[in-house]
Image: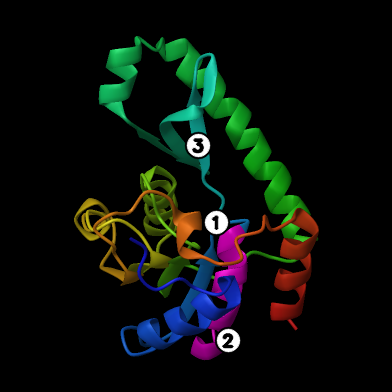
Amino acid sequence: MIGHVFRDREEAGLRLAAAVADRVSGPVTVLAIPRGGVAVAVPVAKALGAPLDVVIPRKLGAPDNPELAIGAVAPGVMVLNERAVRQLGVPRDYIEQEALRQEAEIARREAAYRGGRAPAPVAGRTVVVVDDGVATGATAVAALRWARAAGADRVVFAAPVGPPSAPAHLGPEADDVVLIEAPIHFLAVGEWYRDFDQVSDEEVVTMLREAGR
């Protein structure tokens, strides 16, 4: 049985902004995980009066099954599901090559999304990492570790929905975890939205450009 369903990412972002607003202070930067996380992050950044940028983690797919995640990477950061790696017998050279492939895609997307704009400041600030939901948490962990490594003073993860286990799973990586909904019978992020259409690269570029004005 599904409880509250968000109308769309904008409505979810407005609700998330209200939940985050009294839990952060000082200079803040909002980092969205593309693509869906950008649409959620726009109202969060606006409410906080914070710059909006992206952090781009990428899933590491298993051999012969790219949809099965064995970990994730962000620039200079790798998170591995060691249990899955052992169970599947994934060779280390495959992991290294898959990581290089995904890091190249990260660099391509960063350049495309920013359109020549400088990255938003991270060092010494509170960084709020936003996604439209969290499932396994691998990409969220990679994004949080990247923000910490980049010098963030405080790191917060915020999403409209995720499983009840998410705060405990992400807690070691974040100073605070904000979820609006944590349903017991969580299966997938998309089931909690009435409108969960895919966000295009062009829409991401437009949202980031408008947020930077």
Q: Residue at x 76, y 78 (%)?
A: 210
Residue located at (45% from left, 83% from top): 15
Residue 182 x, y percent position in the rendering: 29, 64
Q: Which residue position holds label 3?
A: 59
Q: Amino acid at mark 2?
A: Lys
| Residue at horizontal 75 percent and vertical 84 percent from the top | 213
Give percent across and percent down for residue 143.
44, 52
Q: Secondary structure at mark 3?
A: strand
* Quadrant of residue 33 within the rendered picture: bottom right
For the residues bearing labels 3 and 2, Cβ distance under 8 angstroms: no
State the separation of the CA atoms marked 3 and 1. 13 Å
Q: In the rendering, which numbered label is found on residue 55?
A: 1
Q: Residues within 10 Å of mark 1 (few under 14, many from 20)?
A: many
Q: CA distance from mark 3 to mark 2?
A: 29 Å
Specify start and end residues of the magenta stretch as a single range. Answer: 36-53
What residue type is disc 1 on?
A: Val
Residue topped by disc 2: 46
Residue 184, position as x, y percentages in the image: 24, 58
Determine the secondary structure under disc 2.
Answer: helix
Residue 19 can be seen, yes or no: yes
Is residue 38 magenta-colored?
yes
**Is residue 100 found inside the magenta-colored segment of the image?**
no
Dominant secondary-structure state across the stretch colored magenta: helix
Side of 93 where 210 appears, left or right: right
Check residue 83 in the rendering and tell me which mark sits there, or answer none. none
> Which of the two discs, 2 and 1, labels the residue nearer the N terminus?
2
CB under 8 Å between discs 3 and 1: no
